[in-house]
Amino acid sequence: MTDSEHGMDRRLERAILELLERRGPTATICPSDAARAVYTQDDDGWRALMEPARRAARRLVAAGEAEITQAGQPVDPDRARGPIRIRRAR
């Protein structure tokens, strides 16, 4: 992993936590919210950050800081397929 990739990973983790902090205690966010928050251009290049944002969410789950949900229920991050939401750990 390059320094810039490592830096982006940390920025995505911070963005997820900051976005959750700004919302209600039961609110969720989409990984795209974090990708858009850290992407600085006006085009749709944030889409390339979707998988890194999902990985950042998985790291936050492993650290006990977040949960990944589907249909409102916590799911195993390694088994989640398709759209996910991220919320604060409960």
Image (cartoon, rainbow, N blue to C red):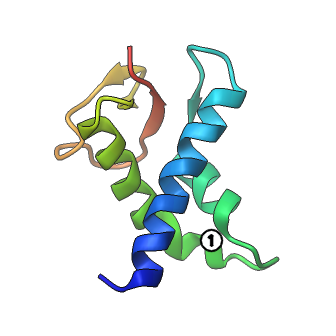
Q: Secondary structure at mark 1?
A: helix
Q: Residue furthest front?
A: 3
> What quarter of the picture does the N terminus occupy?
bottom left
Q: Residue furthest right?
A: 42
> Where does the image place residue 86, in percent across and percent down from the top left?
46, 35
Name the image quarter holding residue 5: bottom left
Side of 44 relative to 56 (left or right): right
Q: Nearer the viewer, residue 47 or 3?
A: 3
> What quarter of the picture does the C terminus occupy?
top left
Name the residue rendered at 17%, 43% in the picture.
79
Side of 32 relative to 63 (left or right): right
> Where does the image place residue 16, in percent across and percent down from the top left?
55, 44
Give the residue at mark 1.
46
Name the residue rendered at 82%, 77% in the picture.
42
Side of 76 relative to 64 (left or right): left
Residue 20, compared with residue 32, is above or below; it is above
Name the image quarter holding residue 74: top left
Residue 7, compared with residue 69, is above or below; it is below
How many numbered marks have been drawn onto this rendered protein structure? 1
> Where does the image place residue 49, in percent across and percent down from the top left?
51, 70
Q: Amino acid at mark 1?
A: Trp
Name the residue rendered at 35%, 41% in the picture.
60
> Where does the image place residue 12, in percent across and percent down from the top left?
52, 57
Residue 23, compared with residue 26, is above or below; it is below
Name the residue rendered at 59%, 14% in the picture.
25
Side of 10 relative to 77 (left or right): right
For mark 1, does the 10 Å Cα neighbourhood hold few (<14), some (14 to 19), or many (20 or more) residues?
Answer: some
